[in-house]
Amino acid sequence: MTRAVTIGVLLLAAVFEAGGDALVRTGIHADSKWQRALLFVAGAVVLFAYGWTVNAPPWDFGKVIGIYVVFFFIIAQLISWLVFKQPPSLMVMLGGLMIVGGGVVIAFASA
């Protein structure tokens, strides 16, 4: 698997994980039982897609986890901001810079 494909698969998996979590979170606060049930099912399907996407490729996940965590952090913060109207605080941004730095260290140490 090329590096570009690996990055694409990790990015897709992070979108699935953060998106599935957002669906479940939305379902918890839904007004009707039907909305709640549909959002929970959709969240379960998307979270299953995450699990399959991240575990199907024949890679050493420990070597790519740094990039994955960076993608997950960024996507989760974007969803939190754009969907739930909760922009990241200064401390979250500072912590995020550390996450990105750690991801870069792990990625290049494993290259």
Image (cartoon, rainbow, N blue to C red):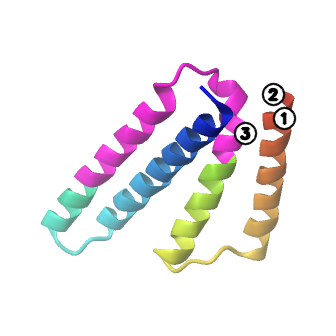
As helix, strand or loop, the secondary structure at mark 2 comes to loop
Question: How many numbered marks are there?
Answer: 3
User: Is 2 situated left or right of 84 in this image?
Assistant: right
Q: Nearer the viewer, residue 1 or 76?
A: 1
- Residue drawn at the location 46% of the way across and 74% of the way down: 83
Question: Which comes sooner in the sequence, label 2 or label 3?
Answer: 3
The residues tagged by marks 2 and 1 sit, at their Cα atoms, a distance apart of: 5 Å
- Residue 69 in the image: above or below residue 75: above
Is the residue under label 1 in contact with that under label 2 (CB below 8 Å)? yes
Q: Is 71 one of the magenta-colored residues?
A: no
Residue at screen point 63% across, 30% down = 2
On whether residue 43 falls in the magenta region, the answer is yes
The front one of 47 and 57 is 57
- Position of 93 compared to 38: left or right? right
Residue 65: x percent and y percent? 67, 35
The quadrant of the image that shows the C terminus is: top right
Which residue is denoted by mark 2 in the rendering? 111
Distance from disc 2 to disc 3, alpha carbons, whole Å, reads 12 Å
Classified by dominant secondary structure, the portion drawn in magenta counts as helix
Q: Earlier in the sequence, mark 3 or mark 1?
A: 3
Q: Residue at x 80, y 27 (%)?
A: 110
Q: Which residue is mark 3?
A: 66
Q: Which residues are magenta?
A: 41-69
Residue that numbered label 1 is attached to? 108
Q: Amino acid at mark 3?
A: Gly
Depth order, front residue of 61/31: 61
Residue at far left of view:
34
Query: Residue 95 at x, y = what percent?
Result: 79, 60
Q: Which residue type does callout 1 highlight?
A: Phe
In the rendering, at what x and y percent does residue 99 appear? 77, 51
